[in-house]
Image (tube, grey):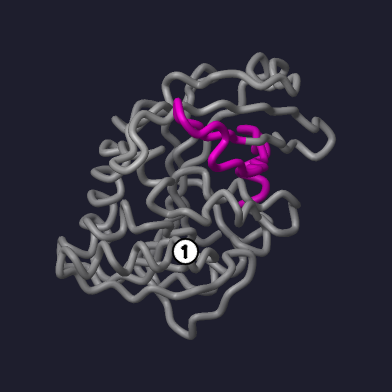
Amino acid sequence: MSNQFYSDARLYDRLFPGGEQAVEFYRAEADRQGGTVLELGSGTGHKLIPIASDGHPCVGLELSTDMLAEARRKADDRGVDVEWLQGDMREFDLGRTFDLVFIAANSLLHLHEADEVVGCFQSVRRHLAPGARLVLDVFNPSVRVLARADGVRRRRDALSFVDPDRGPVRVDVAETYDATAQVTRGTWFFSTESEADFFVAPLEIRSIFPQELPLLLSLGGLRVVERFGDWSRAPFAAEAALQLVICEPD
């Protein structure tokens, strides 16, 4: 788990402010399923708060206390009722079931070992009500991109943002890829013109390949019933940037 990377929740939200297509996708899934919703790795509530505002009873499970505090603040500001719980998606027992469980925005990829991923899916399986579904999204690994992870620090212009206190912030990333572990190990550097590297944090993200994901789900007692390559529900294809899967108990 990359806890340090998530220690400044407001900085995280400024780094990743978008994702509205993903929000609308998960809102639609919640409407389609009806009933109660559980998000694992709920972060600052970017997706769960809009779902709760639609009238669905929602629970967010998040490991980072900093992210949870920001989620609570945002939900309170909007007058939205969400139950926020501190916990680990690798194994959990909430003593109840849900009509929809979802794991968004590559959150599953913080689990580096296969048995951790399977343990997560087994926990999900135990929390699914009759007719319930698990929905998740992870990136589709590109061998070409992984091969370019050579440890050199490079500017990520697309990730630059403006902080209301610091002004323009630039982001540099240095990454290497551990092919044996299927983990990209990176260091992220945040700087302004007057303050170089004011925030530096490691981030390690696993890759899960398209043939591997259904097997891991099956070991957790789940099966894929739909798989898409983007938020418009286009069929999954080799060149897709996204693996978006909808699952049911096996």
- The answer to which quarter of the image holds residue 130 is bottom left
Q: Which residue is mark 1?
A: 66
In the picture, measured across the screen, residue 151 lies left or right of residue 93, that is right
- The answer to which quarter of the image holds residue 235 is top left
| Residue located 51% across and 17% down the image | 239
Graded by Cα atoms within 10 Å as few (under 14), some (14 to 19) or many (20 or more), the crowding at tag 1 reads some
Q: Position of residue 85 (x, y in %)?
A: 44, 75
Which residues, given as a range, are shown in magenta?
A: 188-217
Name the quadrant of the C terminus.
Answer: bottom right
- Position of residue 183 relative to residue 239, above or below, is below
Could you say whether the residue bearing mark 1 is in a helix, strand or loop? Answer: helix
- Position of residue 238 relative to residue 2, above or below, is above
Which is nearer the eye, 63 or 220? Answer: 63
Residue at the far right in the pictured view: 180
| Residue located 27% across and 57% down the image | 30
Three-letter amino acid code of the residue under disc 1: Asp
In the picture, measured across the screen, residue 99 lies left or right of residue 171, that is left
Q: Position of residue 183 (x, y in %)?
A: 73, 38
User: Is 232 within the magenta?
Assistant: no
- Position of residue 204 relative to residue 77, above or below, is above
| Residue located 54% across and 40% down the image | 198
